Amino acid sequence: MRIIGGTFKGYRFNPPAKKWPTRPTTDISKEALYNILANRLDFSEIRFLDLFGGTGNHCYECVSRGCRDASYVDNFGACVAFVTEMLKKLEIEEYVRIHKKNVFSFIKKCDEQFDYIFAGPPYPLKNIPEIPDLILQKNMLSKDGILVVEHNPNVRFDSHPVLDDQRNYGQTIFSFFKV
């Protein structure tokens, strides 16, 4: 895995493989996603939220591109420990708040707004289709903010009222939502 752009462009990292519960966004699809986002966001001006944060891949990418207000949410202790160490290695721990919590519990209690929210849930998770509505109901997306949900072809958002765009990269689909 590598950071695609910004200050840490090309930095490679490898999470431990033993009992690792994540399915990180591939470099190819992540590069395509951030090429799209670079035309829509000024990373130095955003508040970013990474739901189902896993390896912290998206936090590193956003901070590398100038974000100074990122939040990471994951419930798996090994992931949180790995991200904590990576933030120290990259010397960016002051820019990322870590929440070791169940994502749905976090959303339920969240009273903040974010300019960019990325949700990369495990593909087998049954309630992926609920994620956009839960975030919108809690008013977590700022005006002109972007929510991106990563999912596979088994999940469909085609008729969602605030679906703005979809990009398909094989078994990886990014659905973009705007309010």
Image (spheres, rainbow, N blue to C red):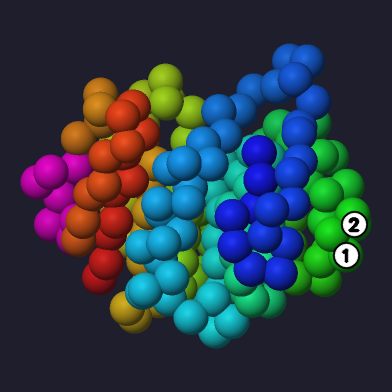
For this rendering, which residue is in front, 113 or 60? 60
Which residue lies at the image location 9% right of the left edge and 46% below the top edge? 159
Residue position marked by numbered label 1 in the rendering: 91
* Residue bounds of the magenta highlight: 157-163
Q: Is residue 141 visible?
A: no
Q: Which residue is mark 2?
A: 88
Q: Residue at x 37, y 74 (%)?
A: 39
Quadrant holding the N terminus:
top right
Q: Amino acid at mark 2?
A: Lys
Residue 135, numbered circle: none
Q: Quadrant of residue 15?
A: top right
User: Regarding mark 1 in the picture, which secondary structure is present there?
Assistant: loop
| 72 up-or-down from 6: above or below | above
**Amino acid at circle 1:** Glu
- How far from the left and from the top, in percent, is residue 35? 41, 62
Tag 2 near tag 1, CB within 8 Å: yes
